[in-house]
Amino acid sequence: DAKTTQPTSMDCAEGRAANLPCNHSTISGNEYVYWYRQIHSQGPQYIIHGLKNNETNEMASLIITEDRKSSTLILPHATLRDTAVYYCIVRVRGGADGLTFGKGTHLIIQP
Amino acid sequence: DAGVIQSPRHEVTEMGQEVTLRCKPISGHDYLFWYRQTMMRGLELLIYFNNNVPIDDSGMPEDRFSAKMPNASFSTLKIQPSEPRDSAVYFCASSPYRAQRHEQYFGPGTRLTVT
C-alpha cells in the first residue's frame, strides 16, 4: 500500500468542523483512500472511503483533490466523543488484505 | 448484531506460559484478521483468513505465534511460550467481501500482559 503522511495531532473546538488532512502523493490509480479512527481503549472504526469523487456519509465527508495526491476528512460538527486517533490508509481497490496503519492524527476536541 | 467478540478482554500471565486469545467474527463475514497494537510499533497485521483458510501470515512475529480458524465462527491466536515483549493489545477484525467496500469491523481487543 502507498504511504500516507498525516499531522501528529490537531485540536478543534467542540461544535466546529474538524478538517483532517492526509497526503498520499504516491497513490496509484487503483487505490482507494480509507479513513478509520480509534477512540481510546477501543478497536479501530471504519469511517469512510473514496476513489476520486467527494464522499459523504452519516459520520463524515471526504474531499479528495483532483490529482488524488491528498485528501481531507471533515467532521462537520465535532463533539467531545470525536476525540480519537484518525488513520488515513490507501489500499488497492477491492483489496481483501489487511490494513497498514500509520501513526495517524490524534484529534482532540476542546470543550 | 453483536459485532466482533473477543475473549478474554484482559489476560495477565507469566513468562513461559501458553496464552490463547479467542475471536468470534460477525456472522456471514468472509475474512478474519488478527492485529497487534503496541506503543512502539502501532497497529500491525499478524495474519488473515479467507473462508477459514490462512492467506497471509507474514506478520506473525515468530514460531511461538500460531493462529487457527476451525470454522467460520471462531478463531484463536496462540502464543507458546509467551514472553514479556508479547505484551500488547490484540485485535480481531472481520470483513465481508463486497467488491468495492470491504471495510473491516474490529473487536474490542484483548489486553495481554506477560510478566
Image (tube, rainbow, N blue to C red):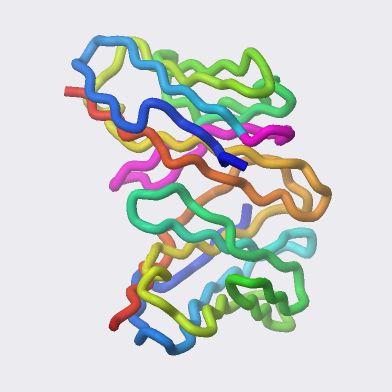
Residue A55 spot, x, y in % from top left: 71, 75
Q: Is residue A81 magenta?
A: no
Task: Residue at the far right: name it.
Answer: B99
Residue depicted at x 76% and y 74%: A52
Residue A25 spot, x, y in % from top left: 61, 71
Residue depicted at x 51% and y 27%: B23
Q: Nearer the viewer, residue B108 or A96?
A: B108
Residue A57: quarter of image: bottom right
* Quarter of the image that includes the C terminus of chain A: bottom left
Q: Nearer the viewer, residue A7 or B109?
A: B109
Residue B19: quarter of image: top left
Task: Residue at the far bottom: name it.
Answer: A16
Residue A89 spot, x, y in % from top left: 58, 59
Q: Nearer the viewer, residue A34 or A31?
A: A34
Q: Nearer the viewer, residue B61 or B73?
A: B73
- Horizontal placement of A107 versus B60: left or right? left
Look at the picture and state if B109 lies above or below B21.
Answer: below
Residue depicted at x 67% and y 16%: B71
Q: Main secondary structure of the magenta part?
A: strand
**Magenta highlight range:** B26-45
Q: Is residue B31 magenta?
A: yes
- Horizontal placement of A5 versus A96: left or right? left
Residue B27: quarter of image: top right
- Horizontal placement of B81 versus B96: left or right? left
The mark tally for this picture is 0
Task: Residue at the far left: name it.
Answer: B115
Look at the picture and state if B17 lies above or below B3.
Answer: above
Residue B103 spot, x, y in % from top left: 66, 51
Look at the picture and state if B106 lies above or below B57.
Answer: below
